[in-house]
């Protein structure tokens, strides 16, 4: 079998089947009850520390003004008067829905492009004798250590005529140097023999990348992909700088105006709408911003769990 | 500078780093020869401010005064006269940038209000809006980027917090004196309706450099929860320091989560009034003293130490992000002193569902009792709209006509559209004739044109005619006692740059003293540090400008 | 092979290195309306804070160093520990659920996190209201200068520890299960398997991340700190980035932000090079090889 076929076969040997079913694999001993208890306690505390504030966020987002007043004007733990007016207020305006569509577009396109560029660069840098490998690696490292200022970056983006274009939200952040270095480290962990055999078989770099390296790097691609996706999804600052028409605003920027400004109408106007309490509006925004990530993440998670076969070469 | 110089610079920056480095060595003296040399008081006082021609098309129920009391309307006027007969533009596209304090509206293609506005203005208004929290970062970026919008709002502040503002204006923005000075403003009657005290703030380098956004002289109100005062059995007008202390204690019950004050800056301002501090600076015979340097300020700090100790202030009062408005709404805090006056409308709306909520206003009396304390008059403006340098004079005139339209006063047809949009689509009219926004209107009308030009404030609370009387009475009571900050209309570069840091350090130290972490004796050191860092420089700069001013216009 | 990496490298050069040239403002009295070419050249005077004994700068530097040490020792290892804890759980579904829960705080902006902490632990927050209503003394946590560093450290852990587990869990998932099986058959306990299989496999990644973290030692957070400076005062809370903001940017002194940026970068380079050499001495790969 050629190396390529070997690795394809080996890939299918998922190496953690027993754990998935929740049962302990046969070789694992029964856990010590004391250790179990300690672990359990530690986890419960950690979970509580996270869940309690989040519960409060959700509760406040559906609380009405009376409940908030009763809580002294602050966050609420038990929403007595429940109202979804905050969610209605945010979601009903056309602005938010359009912004979400824009953000989804930017996130999907941006993540794919970023992954491609990052993987290409990381692969190149992971090969020991790559042409110009060392200087480019230093370049990437330098990018981690030195950050350009606000105004120069703005001027460069402007010079490339990217102002008010969605490309201004993707190209300037296409490659994150930190991500490149991490991905490179993962690529370096792959056994040398794979590359050597592939080279002997006459495979080109591109073939090696696409048919050997990437399929074996699902975990790191999923992780880095997640990092990029979240960055694109939450980015408001670049949009504030570069996007000039409100119709092109991504979701993060729209939501920021709600969170930071806390009101929906001008101070001298009166609306027939029952205005949701400001605090509850802020919390509703938070929840809305997080939900899509919660939805997407489980799909990526399964790639973390899949094992990588190291034993392909042993054949 | 000429247009060719602009493009030369753009080229240098534009071709990338190498060119920038090349440009470095032969740095011309062009940049700094002119450190605000043109911005002197002599030059500025020589400017004839626009003639004040008040709009008489509508009669308010309670009139405004020359001193600065705002006019009041109990209901929205039933007839809305057309104040601007001609359409300002002929189809040009105008660009603008301003901050926005609300949720972003849909753009012109999806916003019937905006489309209607464009039609009425006769221009295609391309407006960039930036959340006010980010505005201070965006503004220098736009300046550095070389492509200015036709109309640009300065960040909020008096004076605008832009270092080297006079030089910036001189280089990039238009001197509007020829269009607005003296009687020239009569061509723009709505701009002539802006009070003279507001125009003072737009004068630099011996010229008028922008359209100020007017704000009432009252500046702020001392809001109180009248219902909580009544429940505690205390008078809403404490007439001396002792009475204020007793009142605050009566309003405080830590166990029930109630306090008198919510944010340290509020009792600081209130006590400042009562202790007769100057309105930031005091001018005596051409010499300026800052409030930090006065004995009255020291007295205020002593009072605050006592107040903090007695527990009448919310425990998180030193948190600058304290949500004091929400605390006020919730009744956790009973007094919201020195809060901007437009908040009246917001508080009423926020608490529409709370039958117990009663909003009141508390006057400030002198410490020793008996007389009203001097009121701190506000700066009179929010920000200034700058017009970039244009070669085309006709375009400038069009822009001014657009701003003129936008400044149409309360109750006019233009004002009604500007705030409430199209009848039936963006708003409906209730039985008393007050416009009420619909859902569409709520989303669409928040385009921040009110920061390009605005009408002078008129007291009005839809559905509650009594509020007009309450506010008008309060203003009529307090404005006559008002004292001005003598440096309004003057520009100090130190104030726009170094003072922010010096002031922060100073207030940090004072907060430590109030909380008891530092002894009161440290106050003297803090003051002298502040003076060295910024205070003395500001004083010199301001005094130099005052020297040549004979009679300070109001 | 080069071609594959060109797009990425180009993006970095154009959008990261090209604007980096703008750091020339470190040597200028940069004013936006004058631009790079007309702003006055001031040589090294923007760097004066390094040698003129400016007490605010020194205080900020000191606070920064303390915080970075605390963060490296306390905050940095937490994701690893948490990842190991999660990994040792039996159920796959439970593991995934908990992971999702733990990374939630990462998505909150600092504005919200600070507000949440204020609501829970503030002097009039939930905890203290409970205490006051039961006649217990108030627990002053927020607004106490001496507790500030502990506060920001716990906030950093709360917000990002869960998110940090992702990368370690991904690395752990690459470990061949057969190794564990073989070790267990040989009689190794769970603890021994952890020490001898799991940790060594993570060593390289951990060291890599540590070295990169050292590179940004002087950046300990800006938004988080500036939001909470008010109640505790400058002395306890000023770090390098807030010092630049308070003394440079709000006063329109852009040159200082450029100077500090360069300073941080140079220090970062020294630390990374040093740490990398150290890693080599221990036989580790580090970030880059010799």
Image (cartoon, rainbow, N blue to C red):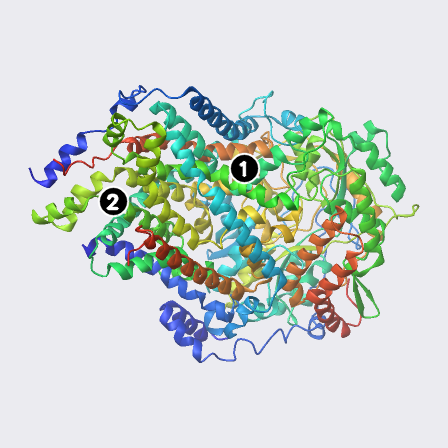
Coordinates of residue A60 in the picture (x, y in percent)? 57, 28
Q: Is residue A123 left or right of residue C256?
A: left
Residue beneath the point at 55% across and 33% down: A281
Residue C172 at what x, y percent from top left? Answer: 32, 35
Q: Are the residues flagged by discs 1 and 2 in contact, CB closer than 8 Å? A: no
Q: Quadrant of the C terminus of chain A?
A: top left
Instruction: Residue at 46%, 27% (x, y): give it.
Output: A43
Disc nearest the viewer among 1 and 2: 2
Residue B371 or B258: which is nearer the viewer? B258
Q: Position of residue B242 (x, y in %)?
A: 89, 41
Where, quadrant-wise, is the N terminus of chain A in this rendering?
top left
Nearest the eye: A87 or C215: C215
Query: Which residue is label 1 attached to?
Result: B441
Disc on res. A189: 2
Residue at mark 1: chain: B
Q: Which residue is pictured at 48% across the width and 32% down the height?
A: A287
Image x and y of residue A264, in percent? 56, 38
- Give above or below for A129 relative to A300: below
Q: Looking at this rendering, what residue extends furthest in the front direction?
A: C187
């Amino acid at each position: 079998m050629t190396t390529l076929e070997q690795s394809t076969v080996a890939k299918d040997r998922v190496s953690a089947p027993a754990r998935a079913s929740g049962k302990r694999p046969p070789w694992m001993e029964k856990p010590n009850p004391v250790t179990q208890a300690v672990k359990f306690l530690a986890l419960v505390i950690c979970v509580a520390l996270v869940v309690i504030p989040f519960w409060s966020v959700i509760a406040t987002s559906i609380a009405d003004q009376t409940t908030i007043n009763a809580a002294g004007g602050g966050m609420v733990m038990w929403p007595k008067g429940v109202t979804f007016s905050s969610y209605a207020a945010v979601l009903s305006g056309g602005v938010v829905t359009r912004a979400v569509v824009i953000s989804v577009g930017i996130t999907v396109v941006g993540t794919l492009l970023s992954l491609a560029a990052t993987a290409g660069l990381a692969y190149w840098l992971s090969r020991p004798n790559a042409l110009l490998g060392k200087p480019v690696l230093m370049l990437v490292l330098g990018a981690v250590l030195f950050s350009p200022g606000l105004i120069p970056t703005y001027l460069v983006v402007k010079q490339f005529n990217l102002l008010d274009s969605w490309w201004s939200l993707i190209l300037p952040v296409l490659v994150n140097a930190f991500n490149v270095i991490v991905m490179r480290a993962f690529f370096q962990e792959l056994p040398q023999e794979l590359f050597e055999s592939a080279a002997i078989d006459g495979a080109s770099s591109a073939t090696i990348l696409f048919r050997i390296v990437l399929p074996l790097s699902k975990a790191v691609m999923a992780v880095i992909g997640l990092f990029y996706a979240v960055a694109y999804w939450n980015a408001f600052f670049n949009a504030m700088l570069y996007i000039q028409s409100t119709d092109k605003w991504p979701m993060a920027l729209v939501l920021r105006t709600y969170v930071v400004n806390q009101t929906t109408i001008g101070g001298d106007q009166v609306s027939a709408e029952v205005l949701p309490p400001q605090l509850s509006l802020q919390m509703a925004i938070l929840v809305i911003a997080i939900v899509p990530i919660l939805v997407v993440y489980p799909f990526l998670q399964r790639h973390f769990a899949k094992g990588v076969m190291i034993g392909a070469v042993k054949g | 500078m000429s247009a060719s110089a602009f493009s030369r610079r753009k080229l240098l920056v534009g071709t990338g780093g190498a060119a920038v480095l090349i440009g470095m060595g032969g740095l011309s003296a062009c940049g700094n020869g002119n450190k605000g040399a043109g911005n002197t008081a002599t030059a500025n006082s020589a400017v004839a401010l626009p003639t004040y021609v008040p709009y008489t098309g509508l009669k308010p129920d309670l009139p405004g005064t020359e001193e600065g009391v705002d006019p009041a309307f109990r209901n929205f006027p039933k007839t809305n006269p057309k104040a601007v007969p001609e359409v300002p533009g002929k189809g040009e596209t105008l660009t603008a940038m301003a901050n926005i304090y609300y949720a972003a509206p849909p753009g012109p293609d999806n916003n019937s209000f905006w489309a209607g506005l464009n039609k009425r203005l006769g221009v295609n208004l391309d407006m960039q809006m930036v959340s006010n929290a980010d505005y201070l970062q965006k503004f220098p970026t736009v300046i550095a980027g070389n492509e200015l919008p036709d109309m640009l709002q300065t960040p909020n502040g008096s004076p605008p917090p832009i270092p080297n503002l006079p030089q910036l204006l001189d280089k990039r923005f238009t001197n509007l004196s020829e269009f607005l000075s003296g009687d020239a403003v009569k061509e723009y009657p709505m701009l002539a309706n802006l009070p003279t005290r507001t125009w003072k703030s737009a004068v630099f380098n011996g010229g008028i450099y922008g359209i100020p956004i007017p704000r009432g002289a009252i500046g702020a109100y001392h809001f109180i929860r009248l219902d909580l005062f009544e429940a505690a059995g205390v008078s809403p007008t404490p007439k001396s320091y002792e009475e204020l202390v007793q009142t605050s204690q009566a309003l405080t019950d830590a166990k029930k989560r109630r306090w008198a004050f919510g944010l340290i800056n509020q009792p600081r301002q209130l006590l400042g009034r009562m202790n007769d501090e100057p309105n930031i600076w005091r001018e005596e015979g051409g010499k300026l003293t800052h409030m930090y340097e006065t004995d009255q300020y020291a007295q205020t700090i002593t009072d605050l130490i006592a107040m903090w100790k007695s527990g009448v202030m919310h425990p998180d009062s030193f948190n600058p992000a304290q949500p004091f408005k929400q605390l006020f709404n919730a009744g956790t805090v009973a007094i919201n002193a020195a809060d901007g006056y437009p908040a009246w409308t917001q508080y009423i709306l926020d608490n529409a569902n709370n039958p117990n909520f009663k909003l009141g206003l508390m006057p400030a009396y002198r410490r020793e009792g008996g007389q009203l304390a001097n009121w701190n008059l506000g700066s009179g403006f929010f920000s200034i709209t700058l017009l970039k340098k244009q070669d085309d004079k006709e375009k400038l005139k069009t822009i001014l006509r657009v701003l003129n339209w936008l400044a149409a006063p309360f109750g006019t047809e233009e004002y009604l559209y500007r705030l409430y949009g199209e009848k039936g689509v963006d708003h409906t009219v209730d039985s008393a004739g007050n416009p009420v926004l619909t859902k569409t209107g709520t989303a669409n009308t928040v385009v921040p044109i009110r920061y390009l030009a605005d009408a002078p404030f008129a007291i009005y609370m839809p559905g509650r005619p009594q509020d007009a009387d309450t506010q008008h009475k309060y203003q009529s009571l307090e404005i006559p006692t008002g004292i001005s900050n003598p440096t309004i209309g003057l520009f100090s570069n130190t104030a726009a740059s170094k003072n922010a840091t010096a002031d922060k350090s100073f207030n940090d130290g004072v907060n430590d003293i109030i909380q008891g972490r530092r002894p009161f004796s440290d106050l003297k050191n803090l003051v002298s540090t502040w003076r060295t860092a910024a205070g003395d420089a500001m004083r010199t700069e301001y005094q130099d400008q005052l020297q040549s001013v004979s009679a300070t216009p109001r | 092979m080069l071609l594959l990496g060109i797009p990425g490298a180009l993006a970095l050069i154009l959008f990261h290195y090209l604007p980096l040239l703008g750091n020339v403002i470190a040597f200028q009295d940069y004013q936006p309306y004058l631009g790079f070419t007309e702003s006055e050249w001031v040589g090294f005077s923007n760097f004066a804070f390094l040698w003129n004994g400016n007490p605010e700068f020194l205080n900020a530097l000191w606070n920064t160093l303390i915080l970075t040490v605390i963060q490296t020792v306390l905050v940095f290892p937490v994701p690893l520990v948490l990842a190991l804890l999660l990994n040792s759980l039996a159920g796959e579904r439970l593991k995934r659920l908990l992971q999702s829960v733990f990374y939630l705080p990462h998505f909150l902006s600092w504005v919200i996190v600070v507000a949440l902490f204020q609501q829970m632990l503030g002097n009039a927050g939930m905890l203290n209201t409970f205490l006051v209503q039961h006649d217990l003394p108030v627990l002053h946590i927020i607004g106490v200068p001496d507790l500030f560093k502990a506060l920001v450290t716990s906030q950093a852990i709360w917000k990002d520890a869960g998110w940090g587990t992702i990368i370690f869990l991904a690395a752990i998932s690459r470990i061949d299960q057969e190794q564990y099986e073989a070790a267990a058959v040989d009689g190794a306990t769970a603890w021994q398997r952890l020490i001898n299989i799991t940790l060594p496999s993570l060593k390289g990644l951990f060291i890599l991340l540590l070295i990169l973290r050292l590179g940004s030692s002087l950046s300990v957070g800006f938004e988080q700190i500036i939001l909470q400076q008010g109640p505790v005062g400058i002395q306890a809370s000023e770090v390098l980035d807030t010092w630049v903001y308070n003394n440079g940017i709000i006063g329109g002194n852009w040159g200082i932000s450029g100077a500090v940026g360069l300073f941080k970068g140079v220090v970062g380079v020294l630390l990374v090079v040093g740490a990398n050499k150290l890693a080599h001495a221990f036989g580790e790969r580090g970030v880059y090889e010799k």
